[in-house]
Image (spheres, rainbow, N blue to C red):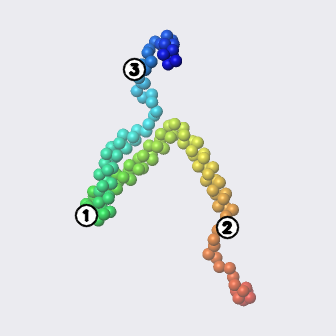
Amino acid sequence: MAKDNKESYSRTSSWKPGESGNKGGRPRGTGKPVSKLRSTIAKLRELESKSLDNIRRSVEGEDMDKEVLASSKWVISTTISTVKAALSEELAIHGIRQKDTELADEAEKEQAEEEQTQVRFSLVQLPVKSDLESK
């Protein structure tokens, strides 16, 4: 049966099975658009392991130069914030952010409604009988 499929395929097509019909491949720049921040993230990722090692050694009690430790913390926090920014940008490019924002707004509204119906604990002290009698 597989032989029949290959024969019928080769009769109707100009290339052989397993051979690409697009020899040049996909043109550059036509893939999924990504954030321009990705190159910055790649450079930060190269420094990430050394930075984490510096922080680990400091936590374990080893004396570290304050500037080296501050730089290590900066690399880690900047990597995290840059990744978040790139993801936000990419989601906006792909139009996914709109739907996520609508869902988040809906969930926030539901949560606000639930909070309004819940009884909250109060530190206000109720008057005792002697307070009422003196008035």
Tag 2 near tag 1, CB within 8 Å = no
Q: Position of residue 35 (x, y in %)?
A: 43, 39
Which quadrant would residue 95 be assigned to in this image?
Answer: top right
Q: Residue furthest front?
A: 1
Q: Which mark is residue 119?
A: 2
Residue at 38% in and 49% down: 79
> Are dots 3 and 2 in contact, CB under 8 Å?
no
Q: Nearer the viewer, residue 85 or 4?
A: 4
Asked if residue 20 shows in the view, the reply is: no
Could you tell me which residue is drawn at 42 percent across and 19 percent down? Answer: 19
Give the residue type that dot 3 points to: Gly
Counting residues from the N terminus, which is met first, the one under dot 3 or under dot 1? Answer: 3
Kind of element beneath mark 1: loop
In the rendered view, tell whether residue 117 sits above or below residue 13. below
Q: SS of the residue at dot 3?
A: loop
The kind of residue tagged 2 is Val
Q: Quadrant of residue 114?
A: bottom right
Q: CA distance from mark 3 to mark 2?
A: 67 Å
Q: Which residue is mark 3?
A: 24
**Position of residue 135 in the picture relative to residue 33 (left or right):** right
Q: Is residue 98 visible?
A: yes
Counting other residues with Cα less than 10 Å from the Cα at mark 2, is it few (<14), some (14-19), or many (20 or more)?
few
x then y, percent, for residue 53: 30, 55
Q: Measuring 30% from the left and 62% from the top, which residue is drawn there?
A: 58
Q: Is residue 65 above or below residue 27?
A: below
Q: Which mark is residue 36?
A: none
Disc 3 to disc 1, C-alpha distance: 56 Å
Q: Amino acid at mark 1?
A: Asp
Image location of residue 115, percent across then percent down: 64, 61
Judging by the rendered image, the residue that carries numbered circle 1 is 63
28 above or below 127?
above
Give the structural element (helix, strand or loop) at label 2.
Answer: loop
